């Protein structure tokens, strides 16, 4: 008897521009699987019912994107340590009919640096710009990799203080908060700078002033559209090592695919090129 088709999805609102169907579709055909990956737009008020009905609808699981990640966090029955610490769920799956959730942004972030800046985690001081949801995943990854000192710099200081407090009981990393006006001071000892703010997102050309960074620092941005953000351009011009955010998007997709379809897929240069083409076409 032919094996039943396995179905997964990305659910958001809006979800039209999600690159996840292209990523998972590439892997499905590469592995010759009897599987589908759909794009589903669900309004916030309908999202809890959507989650509740996953088993009945025949899904193995899926990705959750904006604005549903926090609701997914509240509504899954089982979640792992990463989801608990980050406070948001971006990947769900069914295990014996129980809805489980995790957050794979942090492992995607770490895997992207592992691929493009191997040895990055031997650095001692990392500076994180921003204190929103995306910063939480990045900080979880930095703590997981044992970075000794993590400085959080955010326009609104109170948010950074809260974030540092939430991660205070960690595995040995020291978390410090600096005022936005003190950025140059914070950068002086930074070996790794991560931008998690929306500065430089498509359409904006603002870049924080990074003239205070040592010349050996690595600079990365979690924004991948545009690929070369104003921050990365500035860092590149200053001769610093840079890593763009596209690899984080690609690598965060790996654990979900493995959960739903039982195969661990690979992030390849061909996949990256295909997504760059789609991003170029969409912009
Ligand atoms: P996400 O979940 O993507 O992190 P978010 O929670 O809205 O989104 O957080 C956006 C981050 O970008 C915040 O750190 C925000 O700073 P505030 O906490 O002060 O709002 C930061 N940000 C957005 N626009 C910014 C700007 N023009 N300058 C500096 N920081 C900015």
Image (cartoon, helix red, strand yellow):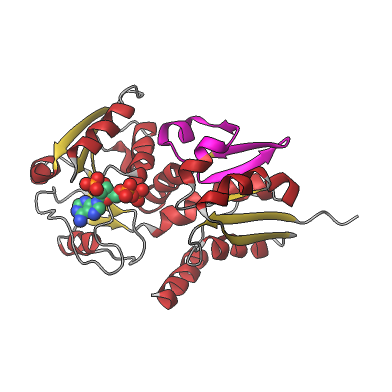
Tell me: residue 239, above or below residue 74. Answer: below
> Could one spot residue 196 in this view of the protein?
no
> Could one spot residue 80 in this view of the protein?
yes
Position in image of residue 78 (x %, y %): 59, 31
Tell me: residue 41, above or below residue 105. Answer: below
> Which residue is rendered at x = 20% and y = 31% of the image?
176
> Which residue is rendered at x = 24% and y = 58% of the image?
199
The one of 122 and 129 positioned closer to us in this rendering: 129
Residue 91 lies in the magenta stretch: yes
Q: In which quarter of the image is residue 143?
A: top left
Which residue ends up furthest to the bottom in the rendered image?
281
The C terminus sits in image quarter = bottom left
Position in image of residue 238 (x %, y %): 14, 60
Residue interval drawn in magenta: 73-101
The one of 67 and 112 positioned closer to us in this rendering: 67
Which residue ends up furthest to the right in the rendered image?
1
Q: In this view, does 257 lie to the left or right of 133?
A: right
Q: Is residue 146 left or right of residue 73?
A: left
Tell me: residue 118, above or below residue 121. Answer: below
Q: In this view, does 237 lie to the left or right of 246?
A: left
Q: How many marks?
A: 0
Residue 62 lies in the magenta stretch: no
> Which residue is rendered at x = 42% and y = 32% of the image?
85
Position in image of residue 204 (x %, y %): 24, 66
Position in image of residue 197 (x %, y %): 27, 51
The N terminus sits in image quarter = bottom right
Q: Quadrant of residue 3?
A: bottom right
> Which residue is rendered at x = 37% and y = 34% of the image?
145
């Amino acid at each position: 008897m032919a094996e039943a088709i396995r179905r997964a999805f990305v659910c958001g609102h809006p979800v039209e521009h999600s690159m996840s169907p292209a990523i998972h579709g590439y892997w499905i055909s590469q592995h010759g699987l009897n599987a589908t990956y759909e794009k589903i737009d669900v309004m916030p008020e309908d999202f809890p019912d959507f989650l509740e009905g996953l088993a009945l609808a025949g899904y193995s699981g899926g990705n959750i994107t904006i604005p549903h990640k926090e609701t997914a966090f509240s509504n899954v029955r089982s979640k792992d340590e990463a989801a608990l610490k980050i406070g948001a769920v971006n990947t769900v799956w069914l295990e014996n009919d129980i809805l489980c959730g995790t957050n794979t942004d942090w492992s995607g972030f770490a895997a992207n640096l592992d691929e493009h800046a191997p040895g990055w985690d031997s650095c001692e001081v990392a500076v994180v710009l921003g204190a929103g949801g995306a910063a939480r995943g990045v900080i979880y990854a930095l703590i997981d990799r044992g970075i000794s000192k993590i400085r959080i710099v955010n326009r609104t200081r109170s948010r950074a203080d809260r974030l540092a407090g939430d991660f205070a009981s960690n595995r040995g990393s020291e978390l410090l908060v600096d005022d936005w006006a003190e950025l140059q001071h914070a950068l002086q000892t930074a070996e790794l700078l991560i931008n998690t703010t929306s500065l430089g997102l498509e359409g904006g050309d603002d870049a924080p002033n990074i003239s205070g960074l040592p010349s050996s620092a690595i600079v990365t941005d979690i924004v991948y559209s545009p690929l070369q953000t104003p921050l990365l351009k500035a860092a590149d011009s200053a001769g610093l090592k840079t890593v763009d955010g596209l690899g984080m998007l690609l690598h965060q997709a790996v654990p979900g695919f493995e959960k739903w379809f039982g195969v661990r897929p690979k992030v390849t240069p061909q996949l990256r090129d295909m997504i760059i083409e789609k991003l170029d076409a969409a912009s």
